[in-house]
Amino acid sequence: MIPVKKHLSTDVLVVGGGIAGLSAAISARASGVGVLIAEKANTLRSGSGATGNDHFLCYIPEKHGPDVSVIVKELHQSMMGASQDVPLSRRFLEKSFDIVKLWHSWGINMRIDDDWTFMGHAFPGRPRIFLKYEGDDQKPILTREAKKAGADILNHHMIVDLFRTRDGIAGALALDVSGEAPSFAVIRAKCVILATGSGNRLYTSRNTPGTLFNTGLCPGCTASAQAQAWRIGATLVNMEQPVRHAGPRYFTRVGKATWIGIYRYPDGRLLGPFVTKATKELGDITSDVWNSSFSDVMHNGTGPAYIDCSDVPAEDLAFMRRAMASEGLTGLVNYMDEQGIDPARHAMEFGQFEPQLMGHGVQIDINGETDVPGLFAAGDAIGNCRADLGGAAVYGWICGEEAAKRAAACELVPEEEAEKDAWLAERMAHYSSFHERASRHGWQEVNRCLQQIMSDYANVGPHHVRSENLLNAGLKYLADMRALAGTQMAAPDAHTLMRAIETLDLMDCGEIIMHAARERRETRGMHIRSDFTFTNPLLNDKFLTIRRERGKPVTAWRDKLTA
Amino acid sequence: MPPVIDETKCIHCGKCADICPLSVFFFRREERAVPEVRYPDECWHCNACGLDCPQGAVSLQIPLNYMLLRIEASQLKQTKE
C-alpha cells in the first residue's frame, strides 16, 4: 500500500492552482480563513493560463454603459452562451470589473494603450465583451499575491479524490508526486473549492492522432473536478455538450481570436461575409458565427480554410505578435520564426480541434457551491456559467468569499473520523493496486483506448453522429476497458500514477458524457443524434443534469435559470 | 525530444523541472546535474521552461508531425484575380 505520509488540515482547500484556484485562494484569505492550495504541477506555470492569456471577458460600466443586461445578453448570444444560468452570468459580470482593477493593481497590464480596450471575438456593430490585456506573467503574479495574502501552496500534489460526511464535504486525498516514490496526504477541510480546469485528452487528437499532448488547452487538465465531484454524488450539468476550439494545424493551440486576418478558401474567396479587411479592432468572426466552418470546407472538398493576414497593416501585425506572447503562444511564435513562417507572407491553414470538456461540468449555485454542502467549484470545470479566463478569475473570487463565510461557521471533521473513512481507504487501495502491479501496460494504452471509444461512439458534429445504438456500444466497450485497466494498467512511479489517475478520471467523464448524451433525445449544437434528428423546442431553456446515486447514473431535466 | 537543454549553459538550478506544467523533467537537487527530459511525449510545448530558465538554456524542439500547414498568401490573391 502506498503510505500516507502527511495529515493536513485547513479551513479552505483549493484544488488546482490555476486562474480560478489562485483567485479563490486570495479572496478566501482576504476573508481571514486559512487556505491551502494543492496543485499537481506548480502554480507559477500550471494549467491553461500557464504562459498567458490576452482576453478577459468582463463588464466595465464606463465602457459598456450602466445596464449590465446588455452585456449579459451579448454573452448569452456568444459561442459560449448556451450553457449559462442567467443569474450566475449576471453575478459574474457585475463583479468582473473589480477583479480587472485588482489584477491591474497587481501589475498585470489590463489597460493596453492606457485604456480599457475591448477586442477579439467582436461582432461588427455590437458591444464587445473581451478586454484585451497582457497576461504573460499572470501566473507568477497571482502566485505572488496568493503567498502575500498568506495562502499555503502545496505544489506537486495532485488531489485524487474528495471525501464527505452525510452533512457535506470533509476534505480530500492528495497524491504527492514531488519525487519518484508516491505517497498520500489526507487533507481535512471545512470547505473545498474545485478549480481543476478543462477536460482534455478525451478524444483522439484531430491534428495529430498519434499524440496525446498536442491539445489546444493544457493537456494536464483532465476534468478531475467533474470526476471527483461525480464520485461523491455531486450533480453535473450540460456534460453531453462538447466544445471544439479552432486554430492552426498541425501544432494545436487555442488563441484563434488573437490572430488578425481574414479566412479564405484556397481560391481566395472569403469564407464568411462579415469582415473584408481585418484590423486589430475587428478581425474575422466567421468561425464564431459558423462554428463548423473549418470542418465543413474539408468535408465538402472546398477547403482547406486559410487565415490570410497579408492585408493587415504592419503595425497591427506587430501588435498581433505582441498579443500572441500575452496569449501564451511563445512556443508557437518561436517555432514560426525558426521555420521562416511570416503572417505577412504566409496564409496558415486553420482547422477545428477535437472535442473537450469546458464550461460543461460541475453544477454550482449563485455562490459557487455545489449540492454537496461546502464543496464549491469555479473556472472551466463548472457546467452552468462559462466565461473562460474571466469567468475563472471572477467566479474563483466569489467561491473564495463564500467558502470563507461557510468555513468560519463550521467545524473540521475529527481526525479519527478521516482515518477510518471507508471511502478513503477504498480509494487508496484502488490507486495503490496500479502501483504495486507488475505489468507493462502503461496508462497511455488506456488513455488511447478511451480516445478511440469516445471518437467512435460518442463523437460530435459536424459530420459525426451519436445514437442510442452507438452510445450503448460505447458504454459497453468503456466498461470492458475499465475492467482491463483495473487488472492490468500499471504505474511504477509517482509520475505515471498521476497520469494513470488522470486517465481514470477521464474514463469517468467519458461514461458520464455517454449517459447524458443518451438521455438527450434530440439534436442540438454539436450533439447530433441520427435517431433524433430534430431540435426539440420543448427542451429550449432546459438543462440536463446527471449525478451518481448508489453507483448508478441518475439524469434529470431542469429549467435553465433565466430570471 | 521537445525541451532541449544546452548543457554548457545549464546551472543545475532545477527551475525548469519545478515549473513545468506537465512535469516532463526529472531532477534531483542533490545530484547537481542537468535535468533529464524523462517524459518528452508529455510536453505541451508551452515554453514555460524556455521563458523561466535563468540562463536561457532551454529551447523547444517541435516534432516534425506538428508542421504548420501554410501557403504563400500571394497564391490566394493570384487565384482571386
Image (cartoon, coloured by chain):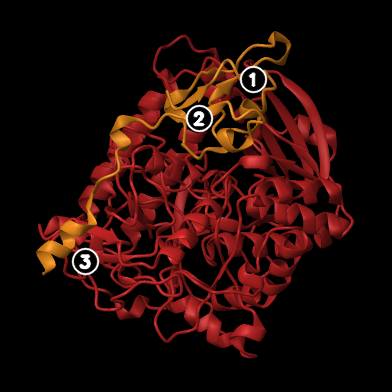
Chain colours: A red, B orange
Q: Nearer the viewer, residue A118 or A401?
A: A118
Tell me whether marks 2 and 1 sit on the same chain.
no
Vertical relation: A11 (above or below) B73: above
Q: Nearer the viewer, residue A18 or B9?
A: B9
- What residue is shown with label 1? A182
- What residue is shown with label 2? B59
Q: CA distance from mark 1 to mark 3?
A: 48 Å
Residue B79 placement, left or right of A327: left
Residue A240 placement, left or right of A68: left
Residue A385 placement, left or right of A377: left
Q: Amino acid at mark 1?
A: Pro
Q: Chain of mark 1?
A: A
- What residue is shown with label 3? A532
Q: How would you rate the neighbour count of disc 1 (Cα within 10 Å): few for under 14, some for 14-19, many for 20 or more?
A: many
- Image depth: mark 2 or mark 3 in front: 2
Asked where in the image residue B17 lies, by quadrant, the reply is top right
